Amino acid sequence: DAKTTQPNSMESNEEEPVHLPCNHSTISGTDYIHWYRQLPSQGPEYVIHGLTSNVNNRMASLAIAEDRKSSTLILHRATLRDAAVYYCIRGGTSYGKLTFGQGTILTVHP
Amino acid sequence: DTGVSQDPRHKITKRGQNVTFRCDPISEHNRLYWYRQTLGQGPEFLTYFQNEAQLEKSRLLSDRFSAERPKGSFSTLEIQRTEQGDSAMYLCASRGRAGLQETQYFGPGTRLLVL
């Protein structure tokens, strides 16, 4: 299995930045790092992915450590709608299937 | 909205009955996945289609489960002789023709409850 390690839960206040960590110490050189999130009663939603360089999109930023053994998903200003389970997934599995862990439950306080 | 759709959204059935779920992927996507998610857990991969060919099946997919994608468009997942342990959310996802890192788009899921 393509294993990653994330904290079970994190909390944030609205409009503050959130840094969600992920460890993937056994990652290979060609494995991408994907982040998906799942809001209550919905299917997972793509957030961002990257290989080596830091990545930015309209939803978030992804900071990847130089040794690629860890990464951090950054939500620059959390909103109540960002409350979700965030999954860090190591790519490279056959046919592109995603191997989800338990993820991090993010709670955002008003 | 032209996202992934799933039908029905909810299904309650009695143990021993057969159920069938449908997934309509994004129209230009030739790759389709089924996942299962139980309460408090992340989704688990069940099976993968590329066009109409079923190329990978998880060991989670027992012989009571069958999936089809007859014309490479929509897909169905059937569970025969349902058991209470089959109660879960069944998720479908699709992606396009690009490399393995292409984003997967998930449907809203079908929540199954077996009584």
Image: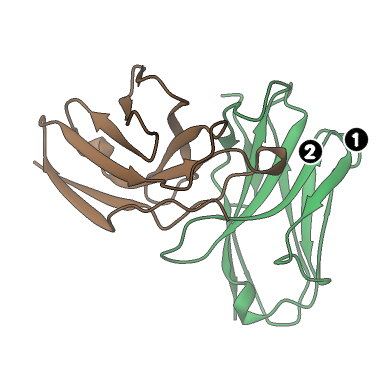
Chain colours: A brown, B green
Q: Where, quadrant-wise, is the C terminus of chain B in this rendering?
A: bottom right
**Mark carried by residue B104:** none
Left or right, B88 with respect to A104, comes to right
Above or below, comparing residue A60 to residue A28 in the picture: above
Q: Position of residue B3 (x, y in %)?
A: 59, 29
Residues at marks 1 and 2 on the same chain: yes
Circle 2 sits in a helix, a strand or a loop, which is it?
loop
Of residues B23 and A44, the one nearer the viewer is A44
Place of residue A59 in the rendered image (x, y in percent of width and height, measured from the top left): 33, 23
Chain letter behind tag 1: B
Q: What crowding class fits label 2: few (fewer than 14 Cα within 10 Å), some (14-19), or many (20 or more)?
A: many
Q: Residue B111 versus residue A67: which sits nearer the camera? A: A67
Q: Residue furthest front?
A: A67
Q: Are marks 1 and 2 in contact (CB under 8 Å)?
A: yes
Label 2: chain?
B
Identified at 76% across, 76% down, the residue is B17
Q: Position of residue B69 (x, y in %)?
A: 85, 43
Q: Nearer the viewer, residue A7 or A30?
A: A30
Distance, label 1 to label 2, CA atoms, is 7 Å
Quarter of the image for residue B108 reads top right
Q: Which residue is mark 1?
A: B71
Q: Determine whether B12 is above or below A47 in the image.
A: below
Specify whether A87 is left or right of B56: left
Give amino acid for label 2.
Answer: Phe
Amino acid on which the number 1 mark rests in the picture: Lys
Q: Going 41% across and 58% down the picture, which residue do you hit?
A: A102
The residue that disc 2 covers is B74
| Residue B43 image offset from top left, x and y in percent | 53, 55
Q: Using residue A53 as the reference point, say whether residue B20 is left or right of it.
A: right
Residue lying at 75% horizontally and 82% vertically, measured from the top left: B16
